[in-house]
Image (tube, rainbow, N blue to C red):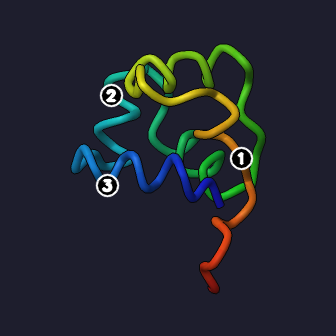
Amino acid sequence: MFYNLNAEMARKKMTIKALAEKTGIGYESLKNKMSGVTEFKRNEMILIKSEFPNCSLDYLFTADQPVGKEG
């Protein structure tokens, strides 16, 4: 659901499990949030953004699919 976040994770070769460990967010909780089952809290978004300092919150957490991509 969060295509940009997933793309940035792929660039860093980071799994959901690794991101969960780095941020202190529970793995199952993070997995549900990334798939859109539950919503991110603002503090969780900030924790995740700290792992991607060159990216904005808006960029990381846009739920839209990138332009020109189908899926």
Question: Which residue type carries mark 3?
Answer: Ala
Q: Residue 5 appears at what percent x and percent y? A: 51, 46
Q: Residue furthest front?
A: 68
* In this view, the mark in front (2 or 1): 1
Left or right side of 21 for 46: right
Left or right side of 39 for 70: left
**Quarter of the image that includes the C terminus:** bottom right
Q: Is residue 44 above or below residue 19?
A: above
Sequence-earlier tag: 1 or 3 = 3
- Residue position marked by numbered label 1 in the rendering: 62
Q: In terms of image quadrants, where is residue 19?
A: top left
Left or right side of 14 for 27: right
Q: Residue 53 appears at what percent x and percent y? A: 41, 20
Is disc 2 placed on a helix, strand or loop? helix
- Residue position marked by numbered label 3 in the rendering: 10
Is disc 3 placed on a helix, strand or loop? helix
**Which residue is depicted at the point 73% across and 24% down?**
41
Sequence-earlier tag: 2 or 1 = 2
**Which residue is depicted at the point 24% across and 44% down?**
12
Question: Which residue type carries mark 2?
Answer: Glu
Question: Which residue type carries mark 1?
Answer: Thr
Badge 3 crowding class, 10 Å Cα cut-off, few under 14, some 14 to 19, many 20 or more, is few
* In this view, the mark in front (2 or 3): 3
Q: Residue 3 appears at what percent x and percent y? A: 57, 59
Q: In terms of image quadrants, where is residue 29?
A: top right
**Quarter of the image that includes the N terminus:** bottom right
Q: Determine whether label 2 and label 1 are within 8 Å by CB.
A: no
Q: Is residue 17 above or below residue 49?
A: below
Q: Is residue 23 above or below residue 71?
A: above
- Residue position marked by numbered label 2 in the rendering: 21
